[in-house]
Image (cartoon, grey):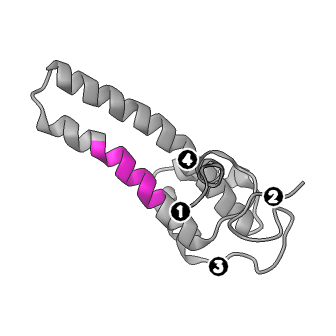
């Protein structure tokens, strides 16, 4: 099981690099965490206290997952030796689908680059 600091780095920090597999699996976990409260929201009567609770939980999960997706994309771009600011393209409709596929399919740069010595670890100062 990964250390808590490793998970914090993976989902909330933008330094370092991640592989295609880590990017895809991390994104899948984020999507599942986001989908669960949305699913629960659809099961309860509209306008009830329980639906309000699940909609609030979904909102919190969405905000956290938004940042997590950005952090994962920045690190994936770093593995491709590209600047993290390019992660903003994930907010452009239609283009974001192509960008996601590129990040999942193209291999990273082998060996060290300006963003870190190895894949799947934070950049060392």
Precedes in sequence: disc 4 or disc 3: 4
**Contact flag, marks 2 and 3 (Cβ < 8 Å):** no
Residue at the spot of label 1: 1
Q: Secondary structure at mark 2?
A: loop
Q: Secondary structure at mark 1?
A: loop
Residue at the spot of label 4: 68
Q: CA distance from mark 1 to mark 4?
A: 20 Å
Q: Secondary structure at mark 3?
A: loop
Q: CA distance from mark 1 to mark 3?
A: 25 Å
Precedes in sequence: disc 2 or disc 4: 4
Which residue: 19% across, 24% down? 50
Residue 98 makes an appearance in the image: no
Residue at the spot of label 2: 123
Residue at the spot of label 3: 107
Residue 86: in magenta span: no
**Contact flag, marks 2 and 4 (Cβ < 8 Å):** no
Residue 28: in magenta span: yes
Precedes in sequence: disc 1 or disc 3: 1
Residue 33 x/y as whole percent: 38, 47
Left or right: 33 in relation to 22: left
Left or right: 114 in relation to 32: right
Which residue: 12% across, 32% down? 44
State the predominant SS element of the stretch in magenta: helix
Residue 104 x/y as whole percent: 54, 71
Precedes in sequence: disc 2 or disc 3: 3
Q: Marks 1 and 2: which is nearer the front?
A: 1
Q: CA distance from mark 4 to mark 3?
A: 21 Å
Q: CA distance from mark 2 to mark 4?
A: 18 Å
Q: In the image, which residues are magenta?
A: 27-36
Q: Marks 2 and 4: which is nearer the front?
A: 2
Q: CA distance from mark 2 to mark 3?
A: 19 Å
Q: Secondary structure at mark 4?
A: helix
């Amino acid at each position: 099981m990964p250390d808590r600091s490793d998970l914090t780095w993976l989902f909330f920090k933008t330094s370092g690099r991640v592989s295609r597999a880590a990017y895809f699996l991390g994104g899948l976990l984020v999507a599942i965490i986001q989908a669960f409260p949305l699913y629960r929201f659809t099961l309860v009567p509209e306008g009830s206290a329980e639906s309000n609770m699940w909609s609030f939980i979904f909102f919190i999960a969405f905000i956290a997952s938004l940042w997590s997706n950005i952090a994962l994309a920045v690190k994936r771009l770093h593995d491709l030796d590209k600047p993290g600011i390019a992660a903003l393209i994930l907010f452009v409709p239609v283009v974001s689908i192509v960008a996601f596929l590129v990040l999942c399919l193209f291999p990273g740069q082998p060996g060290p680059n300006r963003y870190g010595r190895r894949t799947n670890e934070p950049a060392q100062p």
